[in-house]
Amino acid sequence: MSRSRLSLFEVDSDALAAFSTELRAALTADDRGAVVRLLELAGPPADRVRSAPHAVDVLLASEAYPPSAEVFAALRRVAVERALTLAWTSDSLALEGRLRGFEPLREDEDLARRVDWLLDGHRVPWFLRRPGDTCGCLSGVDREAVSEGLEGLDDPPDELVTFARALANLQAGALCHDTLL
């Protein structure tokens, strides 16, 4: 198993929702021009969207499928530009393991549940997830609760203390991700 570094992004929830709505509308209407403009596509990736039986077909294919890979990359790039701000990246490759396995953290069911929201991906929009990613989102209130909960643990590892402080420094919701950079 390879390890990766976790990064925290501050989320502009309104901008992320607006982007998601625009994308859904363009795909639902099969408006290929709108999809190309929204994703800022040019050249072969734009041609793939324009020539597919339906605009959504390019995004229904696996990201490993070469004709779709550049479209997915553009989709993530635009979503990040519009709604996410990189706030912090861990220096430690052990952070994810500490979050998943530090026993005193896991004994606090409420804290463990919120930490899992940062790792399980189900609160992250589909276009920001890839198979095998570690990612998750927290609202501002939940972010504060995780920060305070981690800081309140007895003798937490340095990785958890640093992560708690990074969460505390955010002003909005948090998105944790290991592969958006």
Image: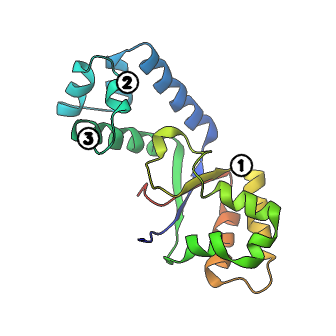
Tell me the SS state at disc 1: loop
- Give the residue type at disc 3: Tyr
Q: In percent of the image, x 33 and y 25: which residue is there?
A: 57
- Give the residue type at disc 1: Ser
Tell me the SS state at disc 3: loop
Q: In percent of the image, x 55 and y 55: which residue is there?
A: 135
Q: Is residue 177 visible?
A: yes
- Give the residue type at disc 2: Val
- Left or right, 93 with respect to 174, comes to left
From the image, tell me which residue sits under label 1.
139
Tell me the SS state at disc 2: loop
Extreme residue toward the bottom, this view: 155
From the image, tell me which residue sits under label 2.
56
Q: CA distance from mark 1 to mark 3?
A: 34 Å
Q: In percent of the image, x 39 and y 28: which residue is there?
A: 38
Indicate the position of residue 13 as horizontal and vertical percent values.
63, 40
The tag earlier along the polypeptide, 2 or 3, is 2
From the image, tell me which residue sits under label 3.
65
